[in-house]
Amino acid sequence: MKSMQKVGVLTFCILAVCAGFISWYFVTIGLFHWESFVKIDPIFYNVPPVLWLVAIFTLIAILVYVVAMLIWKRGMNDIRGALQQLSDGHMEKGREQAGQMSADFKEASSLIIDMERRMSKQADRSQKLMEQWAEKESQLKSEIVSQERNRIARELHDSVSQQLYAASMLLSAAVNGKNQDIEALQKRCEQIEKVVNDAQNDMRALLLQLRPIQLEDQSFKEGVEQLVDSLAEKHPLSFSVRIADAPLSPGIEDQLFRISQEAIANALRHAEAKEISLYYDKFDQFALLKITDDGVGFDRKEHTGGYGLNSIEERAEEIGATTRIVSVPGQGTSVEVKVPIVKGGEEDDPSANR
């Protein structure tokens, strides 16, 4: 707007100067007879003719300036209205208003129409991307649910179902056995009790894995303490928990919580442990999570991908952490996860997105 005002003022000055030169020229060559003009009213006789012409051309310049400003203001209002329509999402109305601009603003009109076309294409492209993303997300969720169902079904068949079948066979043998002494019957009952306890532990471990993956507005410390309290009421186990109140970002804490669930579930199913220890703390350059048990242990060479180790390692890799799993037959297992602290990263703002 300021640039247009400058153009108008410059036009006004040019017309005024031209009026002065034209007046001087007319008087000089004698084409303008001032005496005959002022005979109408002698009061204006003392006014120089040049001033009369300057005044006339000045009025003309003012009129030209006012008309130009009105035309320009109307065009600017059209542009502003068209842009407002585009901003409000009314593409067709914006295009119609741009098409109604005067010839002086046709270039701006074409730019607005081109902008409308680009915005329409971008909106259409965004909608298609959102539809594709929603479709892929739905497919991915379905695949994950299907895989998890298959895994649980396989676990139930390979562990709980087989153990219950074995218990059933032992009970059948005990009931149908003849001439059994008390000692043999007691031994068979102990076997049945062990099989049933194993099946119960496997079932509880599977139920533990079905708990929510995310902490749901809890800190890692609160989530682990609640998990341990719940398990201590149902399992004849001793838990040692040392979890520092040192929060990380929500995404990292969710993965550490899931790793803790996996490690505890493995100890319940396979370790025959009497005590499980959980330790967590954050240092200058890393955070450390360590889960240990005093169970039977295993040889990692023989069980490279078993006991849920792959799941623990994959979850650690997703957050850039390293894992160290040490197990000694007869002495227990230790799972250690070390998470690097990125200065200036999202770990520095643990409350974000929580």
Image: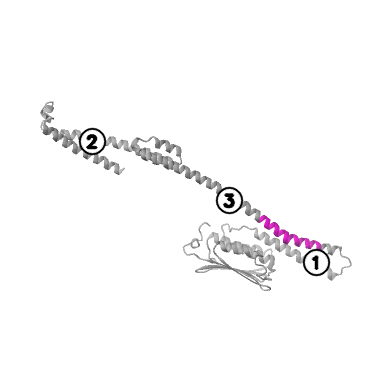
Q: Earlier in the sequence, mark 3 or mark 2?
A: 2
**Residue depicted at 84% across the width and 70% down the height:** 184
**Residue depicted at 24% across the width and 39% down the height:** 11
On residue 61, the disc is 2
Q: Is residue 164 magenta?
A: yes
Q: CA distance from mark 3 to mark 2?
A: 68 Å
Q: Nearer the viewer, residue 138 or 271?
A: 138
Q: Which residue is mark 3?
A: 137
Q: Earlier in the sequence, mark 1 or mark 2?
A: 2
Q: Which of the 4 image quarters holds residue 268?
A: bottom right
Q: Main secondary structure of the magenta part?
A: helix
Mark 1 crowdedness (10 Å alpha carbons): few <14, some 14-19, many ≥20: some
Q: CA distance from mark 1 to mark 3?
A: 51 Å
On residue 189, the disc is 1
Q: Earlier in the sequence, mark 1 or mark 3?
A: 3
Determine whether label 3 and label 2 are within 8 Å by CB. Answer: no
Q: Amino acid at mark 1?
A: Cys
From the viewer's perspective, is 135 left or right of 200?
Answer: left
From the viewer's perspective, is 51 left or right of 118?
Answer: left
Q: Quadrant of the N terminus?
A: top left
Circle 3 SS class: helix
Q: CA distance from mark 1 to mark 2?
A: 117 Å
Residue 317's place in the image compared with 75, above or below, is below
